[in-house]
Image (cartoon, helix red, strand yellow):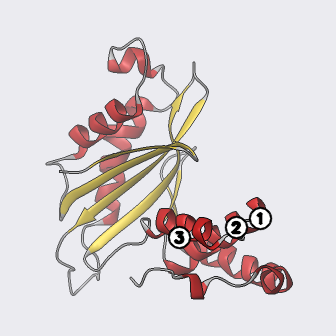
Amino acid sequence: MKAIAPADIIPHQEYERQREAFRANIIALKQRRRMSVGPCITMVFENRATVQFQIQEMIRVERIFDPVKVQDELDVYNALLPTPGELRRYSFNAIHESHQGRDWDCYVTVHGTIDPMTGMVTDIGALDRLVQDRVIKPFDRQDLRQVLGSETVRGEVLAKTIWDRLDGYLSGGTLHNIRLVSARDLVYEVSP
């Protein structure tokens, strides 16, 4: 998928004029790209339009006008875009540390050959069941200090634990990356 470039960003005043229509289109798009995984968790399969909306909103809310800072936003959000042969998904409230009050967003990247019949790298339903069984159910609303056997929960350890729980269990494709986001500046990644 083509990365979002500075030229793709709608200037601030123009974005304000068309924001409501743009937002309505993205909400409708995300409804079609949203999948429920249990009673408290939904996933949105991101694409170029949904990621551009996130960038536009971040620039709007934080009033980012410096081209260097705009490029920083582009670099962060372009990492969410799948490349050919990849499937990426975004989970909301996937893992909750009840004692620390953290919600984690978990991105799972799978690489592989696109199946010509389905147009997918892996069976999404099987991937959802795998994540539900091996990550969500064991971790959701649990004290992760007890689950991980550690006094403190470090994001990099949690990301590696999730990697270990998924690697080798996919029904198709290869696990390429686990990315956990706890807050805007707390990002943890594991790759082979």
At x 68%, y 73%, the residue is 56
Could you give the CA–CA distance between mark 3 and mark 2, rounded to whole angstroms?
Answer: 10 Å
Q: Earlier in the sequence, mark 3 or mark 2?
A: 2
At x 71%, y 66%, the residue is 64
Residue designated by label 1: 63
Q: Classify residue 40 as left or right of residue 88.
A: right
Q: Specify the quadrant of the image occupied by residue 110.
A: bottom left
From the viewer's perspective, is residue 90 above or below residue 155? below
What secondary structure is marked by label 2? helix
Q: Specify the quadrant of the image occupied by residue 14.
A: bottom right
Estimate the x, y position of residue 36 in percent, counting from the top left. 52, 56
At x 34%, y 20%, the residue is 148
Estimate the x, y position of residue 190 in percent, counting from the top left. 28, 46
Q: Three-letter amino acid code at disc 1? A: Arg
Estimate the x, y position of residue 102 in percent, counting from the top left. 57, 32
Q: Residue furthest top?
A: 151
Could you give the CA–CA distance between mark 1 and mark 2, rounded to whole angstroms?
Answer: 5 Å
Asked if disc 1 and disc 2 are in contact, CB closer than 8 Å, the reply is yes
What secondary structure is marked by label 3? helix
The N terminus - image quarter: bottom left
Q: Classify residue 101 as left or right of residue 128.
A: right
Residue designated by label 2: 59
Estimate the x, y position of residue 13 in percent, counting from the top left. 83, 82
Q: What is the crowding at mark 2: few (fewer than 14 residues within 10 Å), some, or many (at least 20)?
A: some
At x 27%, y 37%, the residue is 160
Q: Three-letter amino acid code at disc 2? A: Ile
Residue designated by label 3: 74
Q: Three-letter amino acid code at disc 3? A: Leu
